[in-house]
Image: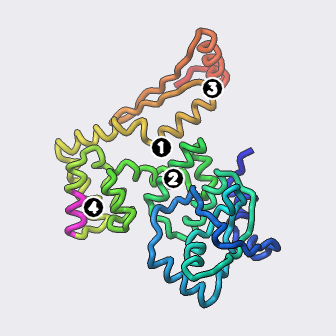
Amino acid sequence: MRKKGLGRGLDALISGEALAHSQHIHEVPAEQVVANPFQPRAETTDEAVHELSESIKAHGILQPLIVRETQAGYELIAGERRWRAAQLAGLKTVPCIVREASDQESFICALVENLQREDLNAMDAAHGYRRLLTEFHLTQSELAEQVGKSRSAIANTLRLLELPPELQQSVRSGELSEGHARALLPLAGDGAKLQAHWNKVRDQRLSVRETEELVRAALETPEGKKAKERVATAGETRDPNIVELEERLQRAIGAKVQVRPRARRGGTIVIRYHSTEELEWIAGLLESKTGGGEVY
């Protein structure tokens, strides 16, 4: 059964209080610890690891690493920077708490630890969310519950994946803030215009509010309005909110559902069936949901 929220198991994996009361801290040879393949952070700066290694030399590792035992050794669940810094500091062993965890739990714990420390950039968070949605087949609601975020926050972060790779890298490096990236998203359907406006934002050091006004003005031109409509049309199957609604409808009626929003307002819902019997069953289900009345 999938755990709700962080769950008692996941909470125990990352909770500082749980670590403080643990009686099972082991000194594990540093060479037997291997990196977490689900680590959501794409880059770790050498400067940050070096500073932490100096602290470890002076004070040791104050918070044990969390690992799980595998055939390859002890795989990190949380604490990768501490582990790398410990290696740099020359430690032969590292304090570890060994926990049982599935791949999904390991991934979520690594993601949540970085989110709680607020040192995970928005693009790495977005890619981490997408992996959980695609590889572990979570819905957005389940994902939001697992990582302790609202569904709207998850959806807004996922939208950053609509940016072209070079702008995603700008967010990852800190050159482009998450606020600026979101302000530029309405131009994602027009690569040339998006790049031109990003250059202007960067060169003129515009604030997020100024960027929003710049994009709003661009979309008010005839060309901008057409681009906005293209974005709305092209993005209808990629909009995470629409995907979430489709999943909810599919679970409710047990049939394939497609939601097709129009560019301006409204849209259609397509329910697919494979036989007359299945169609009659779906109709009966909808009638039962509405008490036999009409569906509007």
Which three-letter amino acid code belongs to the residue tagged 3?
Gly
Which three-letter amino acid code belongs to the residue tagged 4?
Thr
Which color scheme is applied?
rainbow
The numbered mark, 2 or 3, whose residue comes first in the sequence reads 2
**Most foreground residue, 269 or 250:** 250
Q: Indicate the position of residue 224 as horizontal and vertical percent values.
A: 21, 45
As measured in the structure, the alpha-carbon distance from the residue carrying label 3 to the one carrying label 1 is 20 Å
Q: Residue at x 57, y 56 (%)?
A: 37
Above or below 80: residue 190: above
Crowd tier of the residue under label 4, counting other residues whose Cα lies within 10 Å: few below 14, some 14–19, many 20 or above: many
As measured in the structure, the alpha-carbon distance from the residue carrying label 2 to the one carrying label 1 is 9 Å
Question: Residue 211 bears which disc, if any?
Answer: 4
The numbered mark, 4 or 2, whose residue comes first in the sequence reads 2
Q: Which residues are magenta?
A: 197-204
Q: Residue at x 47, y 43 (%)?
A: 240
Question: Residue 240 bears which disc, if any?
Answer: 1
**Most foreground residue, 263 or 49:** 49
Q: What residue is pinned by disc 3?
A: 254
Q: Residue furthest right?
A: 23
> Which secondary structure lies at badge 2?
helix
> Which secondary structure lies at badge 4?
helix
The image quarter in which residue 189 lies: top left
Q: Residue at x 63, y 88 (%)?
A: 59
Residues under numbered marks 2 and 1 in contact, where contact means CB atoms less than 8 Å apart: yes
Q: What residue is pinned by disc 2?
A: 154
Which three-letter amino acid code belongs to the residue tagged 1?
Pro
User: Looking at the image, is mark 1 or mark 4 nearer the viewer?
Assistant: 1
The numbered mark, 1 or 4, whose residue comes first in the sequence reads 4
Question: Residue 177 bears which disc, if any?
Answer: none
The numbered mark, 4 or 3, whose residue comes first in the sequence reads 4
